[in-house]
Image (cartoon, rainbow, N blue to C red):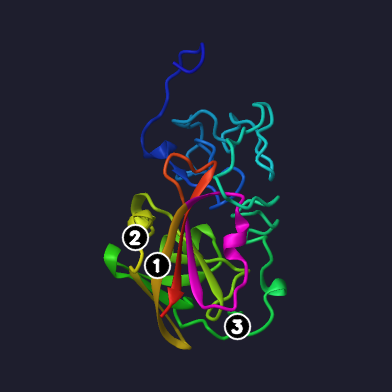
Amino acid sequence: MIGDDEVNVNISKDSAFVPPEFGSASADVLGTGELLTPDISGVEPMFPHSTQAGFAPGVTENGTVTGGGEIVMPPDVEGSTVSNEPIYGDTGTATGGYTGGGADAAVGSGYTPVDGMAYADGSIGTLSIPALGVTKKVYDGETISNLRLGVAHFEGTSAWDGNVGFCGHNRGSYGYFAGIWNLSAGSKITYTTVYGTRTYEVYSVRKISKYEVDVLNPTNENILTLVTCVPDQAQTYRWCVQAAAV
């Protein structure tokens, strides 16, 4: 039963979806994405509001759902700094990207460009979180493919010195950031690149508004910033873990 209509709905793998771009306007809208088996014609998906299937309201870049009203945001996290851009902003490219400043705003000793850092496998480094048993390669750009391979590096942030920004999923087969909100002060994180290996200690674990982009701003201090969606609150909040080099 969907609304007032009785329909036969396919709930097999033929109606499964590849999730939309991480951080895109449709990322938090149930049933959006691409069909896992798009070549099968006539399949009515399990979620009848898929944009691909033509059932869904359109989703615009600013988070407004056409035909379904606007997404209403709850009050901001206490003490947060709110900007006009989401932490996973859509820059109009396929990868989305960090829109809070990036390379143009990060000139000096606290910023390292990603140029020349790529290994043969395409990664730019390795991130290890021993307390969670996580060791994953880091790939530049928060694309769907990178988030499946490992940890994604926010394109606009530094890649070594200063504030290095990472994001990752926390559920499913690619949930490499699952449980980062359980890290405690002093938990160790290591980051290895062509420039060497640094060890960091966690000093902040907090829930922030998805609009609190200043956590990714450039710094002169060498820190890591890890960001992931808050399970079941992804439309509004992000978990943010920050660690300083020791």
Mark found first going from the N terminus, 1 or 2: 2
Query: Hey, what amino acid is under mark 2?
Result: Leu
Q: Name above or below for residue 216 compared with residue 194.
A: above
Question: Mark 3 — residue?
Answer: 115
Cα separation, mark 1 vs mark 2, equals: 8 Å
Query: Hey, what amino acid is under mark 3?
Result: Asp
Tell me, yes or no, whether the two marked residues, 1 and 2, touch with CB atoms within 8 Å.
yes
- Camera-nearest residue between 124 and 33: 124
Mark 1 vs mark 3, foreground winner is: 1
SS state under label 3? loop
Q: Position of residue 154 (x, y in %)?
A: 56, 66
In the displayed orientation, state which residue is furthest to the front. 79
Q: Position of residue 178 (x, y in %)?
A: 35, 54
Camera sees residue 133? no
Quick check: 37 left or right of 97? left
Q: Position of residue 210 (x, y in %)?
A: 57, 49
- Camera-nearest residue between 69 and 105: 105
Mark 3: few/some/many CA within 10 Å (<14, 14-19, 20+): few
Question: Mark 1 — residue?
Answer: 202
Question: Mark 2 — residue?
Answer: 183
Whether residue 219 appears in magenta in the rendering, the answer is yes
**Residue at (53% x, 83% y) in the render:** 117
**Residue at (47% x, 87% y) in the render:** 194
The residues colored magenta run 207-228
Mark 2 vs mark 3, foreground winner is: 2
Mark found first going from the N terminus, 2 or 3: 3
Q: Name above or below for residue 11 compared with residue 106.
A: above
